[in-house]
Amino acid sequence: SLLASEDWEQAKVLFRQTLAENPDHPAALLGLARAHLAEGNAVAALPILREFPISKEYASAEVLLPFAAALAEQDFGELNEDDEQALLYANALRLAGRGQLLAAMDGLLDLLRGAKNYRKGEARKVMLGILQVLGDENPATRQYRADLARLLF
């Protein structure tokens, strides 16, 4: 419920308490990774996702991994200002890194309108990762999923 209400800090506290008692608790690991990514902290989320235990939550962790990797590896220093797609992607990642997930998804949708397979599907996977961070209980998730589906199919 803390993730649904976007209380990322309190959620992290509770997930860490659970993990102190049971370090391999998949739901707590996934929740902690989601909270870190919601705040743009991919450096904290990546190790959790890369070493995620096999469980029913494993598929969700796999959806988050491309988003976490893209956030962690973003490099804005070498952008060609004439490459509109690269600028859109970099800006979306920059917004996500600041915790502005809805604005980041707007940017990704703009990018995907013109380049559905940008970076061999990386932008689409990042979008799916952000949707996973927000969770199905978030009212914006349904709308963004529908927008993405209309755009891709």
Image: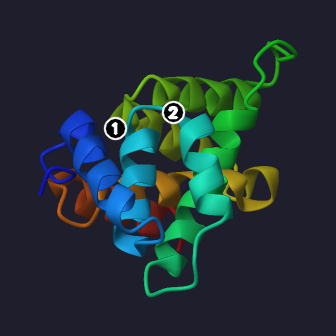
Mark 2 or 1 closer to N-term? 2
Q: Residue at x 63, y 49 (%)?
A: 46
Q: Residue at x 44, y 87 (%)?
A: 56
Q: Quadrant of the N terminus?
A: bottom left
Q: Quadrant of residue 145?
A: bottom left
Which residue is denoted by mark 2 in the rendering? 41
Q: Position of residue 70 (x, y in %)?
A: 68, 42
Q: Secondary structure at mark 1?
A: helix
Mark 1 nearby-residue class (10 Å; few <14, some 14–19, many ≥20): some
User: Mark 2 or mark 1: which is in front?
Assistant: 2
Q: Amino acid at mark 1?
A: Leu
Foreground of the two, 131 or 21: 21
Q: Residue at x 36, y 45 (%)?
A: 35
Q: Residue at x 56, y 39 (%)?
A: 44
Q: Amino acid at mark 2?
A: Asn
Q: Is residue 44 left or right of residue 16?
A: right
Give the vertical position of 10 relative to 33 (above or below): above
Q: Position of residue 68 (x, y in %)?
A: 60, 47
Foreground of the two, 144 or 36: 36
Give the vertical position of 7 relative to 62 (above or below): above
Q: Position of residue 140 (x, y in %)?
A: 22, 52
- Residue 46 seen in the figure: yes
Q: Secondary structure at mark 2?
A: loop
Give the vertical position of 39 relative to 151 (above or below): above
Marker count (numbered): 2
Foreground of the two, 144 or 153: 144
Q: Is residue 67 left or right of residue 38?
A: right
Distance between mark 2 and mark 1 Cα atoms: 16 Å
Q: Position of residue 92 (x, y in %)?
A: 55, 31
In the displayed image of the protein, which residue is found farthest to the front?
Answer: 21
Mark 2 nearby-residue class (10 Å; few <14, some 14–19, many ≥20): many
Give the label on residue 102, or none. 1
